Image (cartoon, coloured by chain):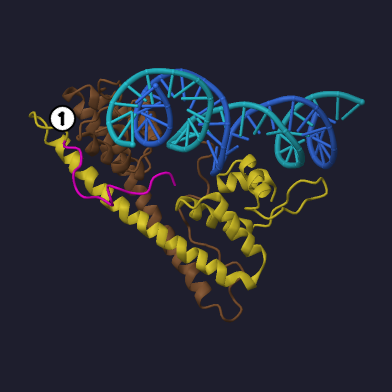
Chain colours: A brown, B yellow, C blue, D cyan
Amino acid sequence: MKIGELARRTGLSMDTIRYYERIGLLPRADRNAARQRDYDPSILTWIAFLRRLKTTGMPIRDMVRYAALRAQGEETAAARGALLTHHRAVVQAHVDELHACLDVLDTKIAGYAGANREDVNHDPDDQRPGPAPDAERRQ
Amino acid sequence: MKIGELARRTGLSMDTIRYYERIGLLPRADRNAARQRDYDPSILTWIAFLRRLKTTGMPIRDMVRYAALRAQGEETAAARGALLTHHRAVVQAHVDELHACLDVLDTKIAGYAGANREDVNHDPDDQRPGPAPDAERRQ
DNA sequence: CTAGGTGCTGGAGCGCACTCCAGGTCAAGC
DNA sequence: GCTTGACCTGGAGTGCGCTCCAGCACCTAG
């Protein structure tokens, strides 16, 4: 499979695929006689997994770390497991936060819906505790 | 409340607060005799809400749009409701995606956990259908 | 033989959301 | 009167994740 078809099948642009290769997210691709990238279909499952990681908000540099471990073979299995386990916790925490945000949105939307009378625009903003009003600055 | 205290209480940096004001996320602040920003505590609830929007992945330009409507008063209530309703749907969809990703992560983590024998590194990547293998390119 | 399509490389450019900085004002304390 | 510290402005710089481009190499069809 050449890069054009891979792009079509993954929804990534050719530029993005080459970029991912440059930074080490994708393994250096085999080349055909004309020095063009020639992919094995198995790359599709790897890209699908990368897409999952990206959807969950993992920064590219962490994906690169994971990819590097993977490229080193089985001896890194434990490290990869730990990495994913940690990431899972981060994602779960974010999902929980999102649920709280959905509640807030629902409250506000309900306010707008029941607003044929006055009563809405006097800042029904948000009031509940929320995760730490004082928190970390400049990460 | 001056900007330093507001920064402490919100976890935003003073620079970020001034940046938010410049782009219209925060209303132009009142000034004291020394031309320093002097905030009413009610700004805290607005910032808390902005933080929710940000957590849910709303791009700043959309928050600015919302803020602009809000600044125009009650006549824009319907528009704001529509905006939030649309955003709610987007967030819900993302949460659903995240749940699917968590499942994938769990599967992979389980694979790593049960990997005291061989059997892990032969690409147990991901295989399930997932949302559209062929999809939109360059958004 | 030529034109069009696909792919190649290296490097520049972009949009986002801040973050940092120089050079200045002002008020309070010593 | 001088220093210190908080805050001011306008503008430049940063890191991320792509995206675009010039200039070139191949291959295939007509």
Front one among A34 and B39: A34
Q: Residue at x 28, y 42 (%)?
A: A9
**Label 1 residue SS:** loop
Question: Residue C26: which quarter of the image?
Answer: top right
Q: Residue at x 50, y 44 (%)?
A: A135
Name above or below for residue C23 compared with residue A100: above
Front one among D20 and B127: D20
Query: In x, y percent, where is residue A67?
Result: 28, 28
Amino acid type, callout 1: Asn
Categorize mark 1 by other alpha carbons within 10 Å: few (<14), some (14-19), many (20+): some
Name above or below for residue A107 compared with residue A72: below
Query: In x, y percent, where is residue C3?
Result: 43, 32
Query: In x, y percent, where is residue A102?
Result: 41, 61
Residue farthest toward the bottom in the current orientation of the protein: A117
Q: Which residues are magenta?
A: B124-139
Name above or below for residue C8 compared with residue B54: above
Q: Residue at x 64, y 44 (%)?
A: B19
Question: Residue C4: which quarter of the image?
Answer: top left
- A57 displayed left or right of B38: left
Q: Is residue A56 visible?
A: no
Residue beneath disc 1: B121
| Prevalent SS, magenta region | loop
Question: Residue B15: which quarter of the image?
Answer: top right
Front one among D25 and A126: D25
As for residue A15 lying within the magenta part, the answer is no
Front one among A23 and A119: A23
